[in-house]
Image (cartoon, grey):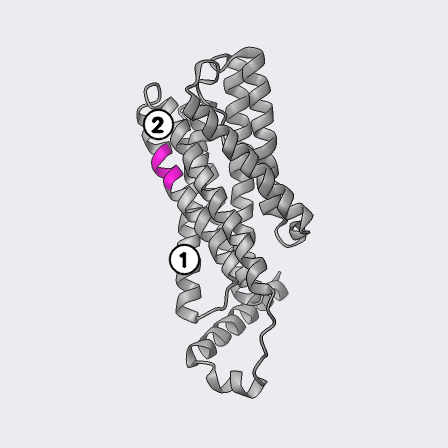
Amino acid sequence: MLVCARMPEALTFEKVLWGVSFFLNTGLLALLVYGKKHRVLPFFVLYLLLNFLQAIVLFGAYQAWGFFSREGIRIAWTTQGLVSLARTAAVAEICYLVLAKFRGIWRLAWRLFTAAATLVALNTMATSRGSWQFAILNLDRGLELLMATVIVLLFLFVRYYEVAVQPSIRMLATGFFLYSAFRVLDDSILERLWHTYGPLWNVLGTLTFLATLLLWSWALRQKQEQTTPELPLLPKDHYRSLSPAINVRLKNLNERLGNFWDAQGEKT
């Protein structure tokens, strides 16, 4: 979340958007820490914390040097790169919460995720045009595209194998996907219209971030409501009889991948 691009002479609408998103981000961060959910979602909390700190640092930088100053621009893009990396870690954390119980599948997933992120970094260096601003823009766009793709694949995997996912985790993943998909489009337009699209890029990005924060806040509230009632559980035999054959294929896939990684570990 970047502070309003025209801070000194910003329109009231832009100031309100930034203020609401800042306080909503702060409230969500406080809710997670107070509810001790940082133990379950440490990277998600880190991402929100960096957003919080970025807003404070940029506000001070713009007040001290102005938005169009070299110092302000450098601080803005540097902090944006850190936030993008933290968001990538948070998406990986969501994937872990869904796939961790399938050790073989997760070991494959994190290797693919890491390899793809490395390719994004290499592509960023190759297409940065010798400018660190374009480097961070390309890194941001590449990581956002990677995250959106990973979440789509995760949803397809969950649907095909009928994997049970907590509603709150599903909504957090949905928020990340919507935000990442929009950022890919927004960054692509900014690269082509660097000077004229800048202010609009920032406003639309803040709007998207605000909508995502609202979705995440609702998702975490839903989780609390759904975990309150304790429903009686069926006997284990009922679950075995109701389990579809597709879960058998999931179990076999997980075991094969687990054996493969164990064999690879023995070779090394």
**Is the magenta region chiefly helix, strand or loop?**
helix
Magenta-drawn segment:
182-186
Residue at point 59%, 69% (across, down): 229
Residue displayed at 55% across by 47% down = 90
Query: What residue would you read off at disc 2?
Result: 191
- The image shows residue 213 at horizontal and vertical percentages of 50, 42
Q: Is residue 247 above or below residue 146?
A: below
Residue density around tag 2, few if under 14, some if 14–19, many if 20 or more, within 10 Å: some
- Residue 153 - label: 1
Q: Using the numbered discs, state the Cα–Cα distance from disc 2 to disc 1 in whole angstroms.
A: 27 Å
Residue type at mark 1 is Leu
Against 86, residue 174 (above or below) is: below
Is disc 2 placed on a helix, strand or loop? Answer: helix
**Local SS, label 1:** helix
Q: Horizontal and vertical percent for residue 131? A: 44, 22
Instruction: Give the x, y percent position of residue 109.
Output: 50, 58
- Residue 86 picture location, percent across and down: 56, 40
Q: Quadrant of residue 185?
A: top left
* Residue 123 falls in image quadrant: top left
